[in-house]
Image (tube, coloured by chain):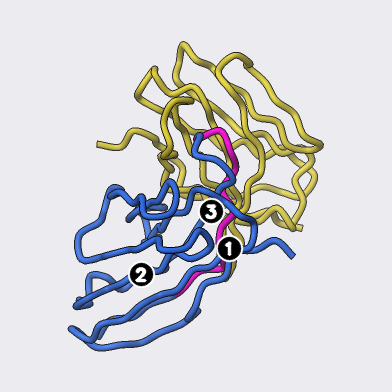
Amino acid sequence: EAQVTQNPRYLITVTGKKLTVTCSQNMNHEYMSWYRQDPGLGLRQIYYSMNVEVTDKGDVPEGYKVSRKEKRNFPLILESPSPNQTSLYFCASRIGTSVTGELFFGEGSRLTVL
Amino acid sequence: DQQVKQNSPSLSVQEGRISILNCDYTNSMFDYFLWYKKYPAEGPTFLISISSIKDKNEDGRFTVFLNKSAKHLSLHIVPSQPGDSAVYFCAVGSGGSYIPTFGRGTSLIVHP
């Protein structure tokens, strides 16, 4: 089954404790991205990747890192989480780099930073 | 400043009636428009799209209308069903770019 898998789905952590949210897709998609969803703010892009070893900042990259060492994986790293990073995070992938392709989203990872 | 606006945070409709969700954008360079639907505890899923060379695209009960001069698009759901209750996001982009810009979403509730 074609899918985007995120882990963990739920996480409660404390300020400053590094964490990684993994994202994996099995569709051989070139493009991958991370979004956060906050009440009243919709979906905001954090980082995206056009292909292996090619990443770039989205609208809200502060406090996050990403890497794309393999085509299927695109982990989101919070080196020193803060309470304002409490959010619902979505990983998404797309077959090509053009905006005309549909995005496939994971089920989301709800992160709480205390 | 928001490039994509969904001015109605919520919409309530009776089953069987039409649901109309609206989206306005500011940049006339945008030429591709998508709608995504999101149920609670799930990721968004693609619903329907339209390019700027068209003014209408239809897929079953879902129709998207594009008014380029007004920089406005709308999603019509006819007839609305309780299973359509979800948050709907519009997303816009230009064909030469990689990144869609999302609106803040409209929560649709369809009452039985």
Residue at 79% from the left image edge and 41% from the top image edge: B79
Q: Chain of mark 2?
A: A
Q: Give x and y (percent) for residue A26.
A: 63, 63
Residue marked by disc 3: A93
**Mark 1 and 3 residues: CB-CB less than 8 Å, in contact?**
yes
Residue marked by disc 2: A87
Q: CA distance from mark 1 to mark 3?
A: 7 Å
Element on which disc 3 rests: strand
Q: Is residue A100 magenta?
A: yes
Element on which disc 1 rests: strand
Residue type at mark 1: give it: Gln
Residue type at mark 3: give it: Ser
Q: Quadrant of residue B59?
A: top right
Q: Chain of mark 1?
A: A
Q: Earlier in the sequence, mark 2 or mark 3?
A: 2
Q: CA distance from mark 2 to mark 3?
A: 20 Å
**Mark 1 and 2 residues: CB-CB less than 8 Å, in contact?**
no
Q: Is residue B69 magenta?
A: no
Q: Is residue A110 above or below residue A95?
A: below
Residue marked by disc 1: A25
Please, what is the dominant secondary structure of the magenta stretch? Answer: loop
Q: Is residue A4 above or below residue A94?
A: below
Residue type at mark 2: give it: Ser
Task: Give the magenta-colored segment's residue range.
Answer: A99-109
Residue nearest the viewer, comparing A98 with A72? A72
Residue at 62% from the left image edge and 24% from the top image edge: B65
User: Among the chains, which one is yellow?
Assistant: B
Chain A's shade in the image? Answer: blue
Q: Chain of mark 3?
A: A
Residue at 47% from the left image edge and 53% from the top image edge: A32
Mark 2: give few (<14), some (14-19) or many (20+) Cα within 10 Å.
some
